[in-house]
Image (cartoon, rainbow, N blue to C red):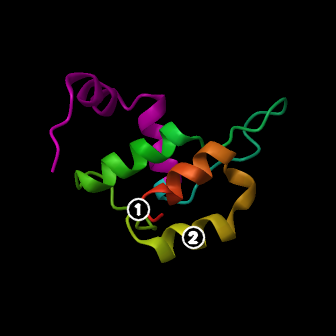
Amino acid sequence: MAELTPEQMREILRHGSRYQRAVQLLHEDWDFKKSPIANELVDAVDVSWARLLQRQGLITGRVNLDDYRSASQLIARYPQWFSAAGRQELLAEFN
């Protein structure tokens, strides 16, 4: 298990925006309609943060991002949530 950087630890302790977005993704609680002007899509950084939290054992969530079946089912259930980069990051480890 990789060590958390001081910046990552601060983000987690403060429950910063990246942390909150990652938790929402892991709990399948993404508020797609949050912004009336532009939808907030899951991007590559959100997926990376979610994986980091899951691998560190901090947030289990409803989906295992290290399992291809779980990751692909997440995309199938909520295709509108993901940017192209977010989808690519989610599946990159399985290619």
On screen, 9 above or below 93? above
Q: Is 73 drawn above or below residue 1 in the view shown?
A: below
Q: Position of residue 94 (x, y in %)?
A: 45, 65
Residue 21, compared with residue 16, is above or below; it is: below
**Relative to 8, is 93 on the left or the right?**
right
Dot 1 alpha-carbon crowd within 10 angstroms: few under 14, some 14 to 19, many 20 or more: some
Residue pictured at 20% horizontal, 35% vertical: 4
Q: State how far apart marks 1 and 2 are (Cα).
A: 16 Å
Q: Residue 77 has which mark?
A: none
Give whichever of 52, 94 is nearer the camera: 94
Which amino acid does the dot numbered 1 rest on?
A: Gly
3 sits left or right of 81 in the view = left
Q: Which label sits on residue 61?
A: 1
* SS of the residue under disc 2: helix
Which amino acid type corresponds to the residue marked 2 in the rendered image? Ser
Question: Residue at left 32%, top 55%?
Answer: 54
Toward which corner of the image does residue 65 lie, by quadrant?
bottom left
The numbered disc on residue 72 is 2
Element assignment for label 1 = loop
Task: Specify whether residue 95 is in view.
Answer: yes
Identify the residue shown where x is 41% and y is 48%: 50
Place of residue 91 in the rendered image (x, y in percent of width and height, measured from the top left) = 52, 60
- As drawn, is 65 to the left or to the right of 31? left
Q: Which residues are magenta?
A: 1-25
